[in-house]
Image (cartoon, rainbow, N blue to C red):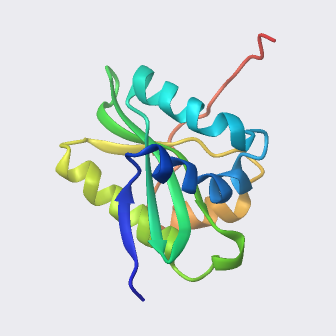
Amino acid sequence: MNEKILIAQTDNEIQNCYSVMAELRPHIQAGEFLERVKKQEGISGFQLAYIIDEEVKAVAGFRISEWFAGGKYLCIEDLVSKESERSKGYGGKLFDWLVEYATKENCDQIQLVSHVRRFDAHRFYLNKRMIIEAHYFSMALR
């Protein structure tokens, strides 16, 4: 394997992450993906990290922010492996890379929100030594 983990910086690199990200976020169309990523980069520092080995195998969307309650943190907004590549360790490698990145950026913690029905994802995060420390509440406005 000649895999590498990179942060998508060019439009082409961002667009190459789409097919894998669409497996987690199917409501985002290919034609709007680049624009939405660039918008989030500008608003909140959103970034895409990805594993490539001839093709993109896994993608993570993340941002670094800070809260009064918890200090500086890296928030994983998306983490998905290509369906045909699942259970091959790509998601775990990308998660571990994010932990290293957060450490280098002097973050106090890593956070993420995962939908209550994503049981396989929860098992993965718990196996990665994450804990469930809060309830997440929302209210639809539209």
Question: What residue is shown at x 73% (from left), y 56% (from top)?
Answer: 23
Q: Quadrant of the C terminus?
A: top right
Asked whether, in this view, residue 48 is left or right of residue 80, the answer is: left
| Residue 24 rendering spot, x and y as whole percentages | 70, 52
Question: What residue is shown at x 42% (from left), y 89% (from top)?
Answer: 1
Task: Check the image and report above or below for 36 versus 27.
Answer: above
Question: What residue is shown at x 36% (from left), y 72% (from top)?
Answer: 4
Asked whether, in this view, residue 128 is left or right of residue 24, the answer is: left
33 vs 69, nearest the viewer = 33
Asked whether, in this view, residue 86 is left or right of residue 112, the answer is: right
View extreme (top): residue: 141
14 vs 92, nearest the viewer = 14
| Residue 54 rendering spot, x and y as whole percentages | 50, 78
44 vs 111, nearest the viewer = 44
Task: Check the image and report above or below for 112 versus 122.
Answer: above
View extreme (front): residue: 12
Task: Check the image and report above or below for 69 versus 126.
Answer: above
